[in-house]
Structures are given as structure tokens and as C-alpha cells.
Image: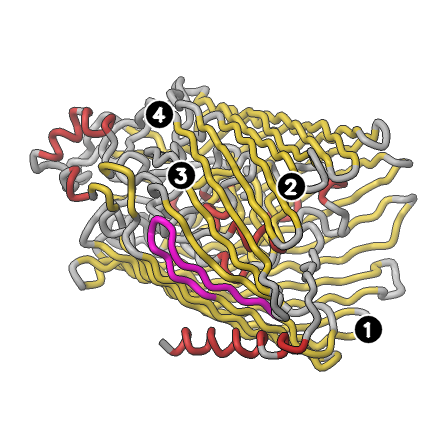
Amino acid sequence: MKLKKITFILLFIFTYPALAADKAILTVPTTAVTGNPLGVSSDQMVIPISILNGRELSLKRENTLAETLNSIPGVSNSSFGPSAGRPMIRGMDSDRIKILQNGVNNLDASNLSFDHGVSIDPLIIEQIDVIRGPATLLYGGGAVGGVVNAIDHRIPKEKFEGITGRGEVRYGGANLEQSNAAVVDVGTGNFVMHFDAYNRDAKNLKIPRNAVSNRKRDTQSWQVQEGGAGGFAPSGEYGIHKLINSQSETKGGAIGASMIFDRGYAGVSYAKHQTQYGSPLESAVSIDMDNDRFDFASEIRDLGTFFDRAKFRAAYTDYMHKEIEGGAINTTFKNQGVDGTFELGHQPILGIKGVMGLQFESGKFQALGAEAFVPSSKTNSQSAYLYEELPINQHKVTFGLRHGEHDVDSKGGGNFTAANKSFKTNNGAIGGLYTLNSQWSLAGNLSHNERAPSYFELYANGVHAATGAYEQGQTNLKIEESNGLDGQIRWKTGQDSLTLGAYSTKFSNYIGLISSDAHNAGTQNYKPSIFTGIKAEFKGVELEGKSMLTDNLQLNVRGDYVDAKDKTNGGYVPRISPLKLGVGLKYEFDRFGARLDVLHAFKQDRVAINYNYIAGKELITDAYTNISMMATYKLPTQYNLEAFTKANNLLDEEIREHASFLKDIAPMGRRSIMFGLRGDF
């Protein structure tokens, strides 16, 4: 209740001065692309990148970070119901996707389990950068699949006088969401403060038909479970026209401050994020997440030496996640750690400009309770990297190296092995951007990537309720190694653009969770799934384009396809998104705007054969077509206010995302409409 009051007070603070302001449209300033510390624009990047910010991001915000990014080619949502979902990029997830907040790792437990939500709420994010493909040079060997960087401006970087901010309220959707958020920055010249607060309350998700798919109900294993074995609920208990135990409540806020100097800045911020949500897999289970984060950032420019700029960023995170069953705490997950980067940019040498940096991470993870399938552990990593760019007329060559050292300790106890494992990783890449003429260009990148095994891949040994499997780590796992090739052809003229890309990543050692048919002692009637090194290959294509058909009408197209094969055991890697093709029309005239989008996902029958999927094998997913619409209207008042409405799944189809771990018992929402009001000054 207190947080709601704070939110509305902040909304009043920034709307009151607007009474006397002239009507204007705010252009939200963009920040430098995170994949390149040299500050180039996205179309000058060698590796593929997509950026969401400003009004476009405001209208695309959804319940989770992954759902917000679901329209970007190559990105899918590994949702565990509407409240938990982590972005997958090019078929890869977990530690292969780095989720950053303001360029620093987001240390929660979402990489450990699919039912653990990401501790970032899209309501207060100002910009999201998505790098598709290996970004291991600047963000560590773990970023083999890509990087998602959520930027919130909680540490201001520019001086100004006065008050600026934005606010938003919304209601509706398939989960009857009620949410509000306010962001305010107050500047007195060199000293700038930031405040934000948000609240979100959502009910059980309304769905078109039965929560359990026909394919799932027809399987023999599910029919046995409905008879009373296996520990899962009968089909009807997951919901009919409503997804049982899918409600959520989220609140949070932050305060930050910076001193702005002539040649840089230094600032700190504190943020708190709390959320409670149900687990659709188990009707009696809810999750209570609490995250505290302290950030520090500083940059000094124009040093007048060989190193002309220095940047330091660090964050301390105190994360706790309680799984509550029948009103009692069953299992608690804690993650405390610090992550940071120190970076130096140098003067050009024979035309070559770039940066060198050091990154450090130290984390303490604890799992306590009945369903602790991993031991308490400590992870320490230190890395040094070098990234350089060489302009050659209108072309460009990029290259970089990274060396990392990683220690992963297990405390042991119970069923767990006490052990210490150390790894050294080496990553390298070379790329180029070749400009054919004023409209056409080619980009390519060749990389060697190495990732150290995570604590759960090494030391897991227990029943993981979220996967319905007995997961076993292996302390003798080797470093995950891959070689990647990425290429794009780009066309741009005026406001029209088209990008077509293809990629291939071959793993000589891919750490996958492989199911076994044997029942080992102590597995409690679950088939063990073992983290095992295999050979794998990921390849695919991505398409994105837009064209102004008239002065007021824009055509948008998108598409992506990924093929991921298990080269050791045969078959495919699990939960790979199918071929998707989309087309949209965007119309704007005076105060009115409208948008129509059609996305078709084809049938996915390329399923894994060595993977347990909620007490069964991975099943085929049927095709679907999602038609959505949006309308906006800028109110004719002295306020800079815009009303909007969003309608989704207009055909009321049964949409099951193949990348979702619960796709066969938790579909996406039914036909719905949401109303909202946003404003800024």
C-alpha cells in the first residue's frame, strides 16, 4: 500500500508542472550500444543487435523481460507460466545468455531453474539492447548465445536543471493486470537524483481451452499420472479457461544520485524488487522473491594521456527466493555477490581504437530445504579482455581477445560432493563491416568461444521439481567450446531498411541435460537426467525489415528459424523455437496511431529424443497464428499524455510456445484487451 501511494505521489509531481507547459513530444535519448564500448550506432555494429527504447519500448512492455522481447527475431520466451520467463536467443538459454542491468550482470537464480523469474521489471526500463550471437569478448565466455542489457538510468550521466520524468497506468489483458509506474529525475546542475516506483497485480491467466494440451493428455505417461501416480495433478486441476495458480503481485522502486563533472560523472543507486507468484505446475506452490541491489558507476573522459577515458561499473546483489508450499517455506535459494568491470579506452594507434578491461565476479549461492537439488557453492571469476576496431575508409575490421579464470566450489553435505574445480577460458573473434555503396553493406564475424561449467552443471544431485527429473551434475565436465560464424547483408535508404542474416555455431563440447532410461538408487522413481558434454550444431536465419508505404503507413516484416542438432546422440536439442514469420502495418496521423501485427509460428516437430519433459518426452507443438492490434491517441491537453489500447490473440487460438518448459500444461493467454495511459515531460 505504501508503494502504491509513493507511485501516485510521483505521478502527481511530474504531471503538475506540465499544466503550464507547451504541448511537445518527448524524444527519449538513446545510450551507447552495450556491445560496443566505442559508442557506434547499431547499424555500424559487426554482430547483430536490436534496440528497444522510447515510445516503442513503452508500448511493447509486458509482464516479463522475455515476453517484452518476444517480437525480436531470434528471441523466444522460456516461460514457466506468465510470471516467470527468461529470454532464449537462437535456441540457447541458461548461462549461455547473459542478462545485464546497466552493463553489469544481473545476479539472481533465473539461470538455475525455469520457474525462477528474472528480477528485472520492464515497467521502469528505459532501453533494452539485445545482442544475438556470441558476445563473449566483452561479457565473458558464458555469453555464447547472446546478451540482453536492460538500461534504467538509475545512475544519471548528464547534468540538467529542473524535473523530468514519465508515468504509466494500465489495466486489462488476459490476466487482468493492474499496473502503474513512475520515474522522476531531479537536477540542480551538477547534482542529479533519480526516483522510480512501480506496482503490478495480475490474476490467474485466462486461456482459450484446457490448460493441458490434447497431445499431452493422449500420452501414456500422462494417463498413468491422472490415475494417481507421478506426483502431478490431473488435467482439470491445471485449469479449464483459466490457468490455475498463475497469479502474481510485484512491487519495487529505486533511488539514485550522481555528481556530474565536466569530464565525467560518479553515481550510486539502490533498488528493491519484490514479487510473489504462483507456480502453474504445482497448485499449492507459490514463490516469494526479494532482491536488493546496490550499483556504483563512474566514468572519466579526456584524460590527456594514452588512455583517454576510464569507466568503472559494479553492483552488489542480495537475492532471496522462497518456495512456499501449503503456507510453509519448503526451499530457499539465496545468491549474494558482486560483479564489476573496469575499462580503459585508448588513443588511436595507427588508426586502431579500442578498449581493454578487467571483469570480476564473486558470488555465494545457497540452497536450503527439502527440494535443494544443488549444494551451497561459491563462484569466483576474473577476466581480462581487449577489443579493437580499425576503420578502413568506409569499411571496418574488428578483433578481440579474452582470457578468464574461474573457480567453482561446492561445500558438499548430504547427497552433495564437496569439491573445487578451476577452469581457464580463452575467447577470440575477428569481424568486419564492408560497405558496398550508400545503401548496401555486408557484416561478418568469426569467433571461438569457451564457457566454464556452472555450479549446477557440476554439482547438482537431486529431484528438480520444475523439470520433473532427477538432475545429476558431473565434476569431470570439460569447458564448453564452440566456433561461430555469423553474416548479414544490410540495406538501408532513408527510413526503409532490410537485414537478412545467417549463422552457424558448432560445439565440440556442449553441456546438455541428457535423460537416462536407467533408474539409479536414490532417484525416487525419477529417471535421472545427467549434465553431459555432447557435440551440437546450431544454425539459422533471421530477417527484419521496414518500409514506408506512404508518409503515414509503415510495413514491417520479421522472421527467424533455428535448427539445433545433437550430433552425439542424434535428434535435436530440446525446446527450439519453430520457424516464425511476421508482418505488420503501422499507421500514424496527427494524434492517432494504429498497428496491426500477424505472427505465424509453424508446427515444430523437430523434438529431442534424449530429454525428459515434465515426466515425459518432448512433444510436437502445433502451429498457431497470433493477430494483435494496438491503437494510440495523444490527448489534446496541455499534458503530454497518450492513451493506448492493446488487443492480443484476436483469433482466440491455443498458443503454445515450443520454447516454454510448460507449453503442454500452460498455454499463452486467450483473446484479450488492455487499456493504458502514459505520459512524460
Q: Which residues are magenta?
A: 165-180
Disc 3 secondary structure class: loop
Return the residue at label 1: 262
| Dot 2 alpha-carbon crowd within 10 angstroms: few under 14, some 14 to 19, many 20 or more | many
Residue type indicated by callout 1? Asp
Q: Earlier in the sequence, mark 4 or mark 2?
A: 2
Residue 146 in picture, x, y percent from top left: 57, 41
| Dot 1 alpha-carbon crowd within 10 angstroms: few under 14, some 14 to 19, many 20 or more | few
Q: Earlier in the sequence, mark 1 or mark 4?
A: 1
Disc 1 to disc 3, how far (Cα)?
Answer: 51 Å
Q: How many marks?
A: 4
Residue at (50% x, 61% y) in the render = 677
Query: Is 108 located above or below residue 294 in the figure?
Result: above
Tell me which corner region of the image, top left, top right, bottom left or bottom right, holds residue 680.
Answer: bottom right
Q: Which quarter of the rendering shows the N terminus?
A: bottom left
Return the residue at label 4: 622
Task: Give 102 or 439, whichever is nearer the viewer.
Answer: 439
Q: Which disc is residue 649 wearing?
A: 3
Would you say residue 206 is visible in this rendering? yes
Disc 1 to disc 2, how far (Cα)?
Answer: 31 Å
Q: Nearer the viewer, mark 1 or mark 3?
A: 3
Return the residue at label 2: 49
| Dot 3 alpha-carbon crowd within 10 angstroms: few under 14, some 14 to 19, many 20 or more | many
Residue type indicated by callout 4? Asp
Q: Nearer the viewer, mark 2 or mark 3?
A: 3
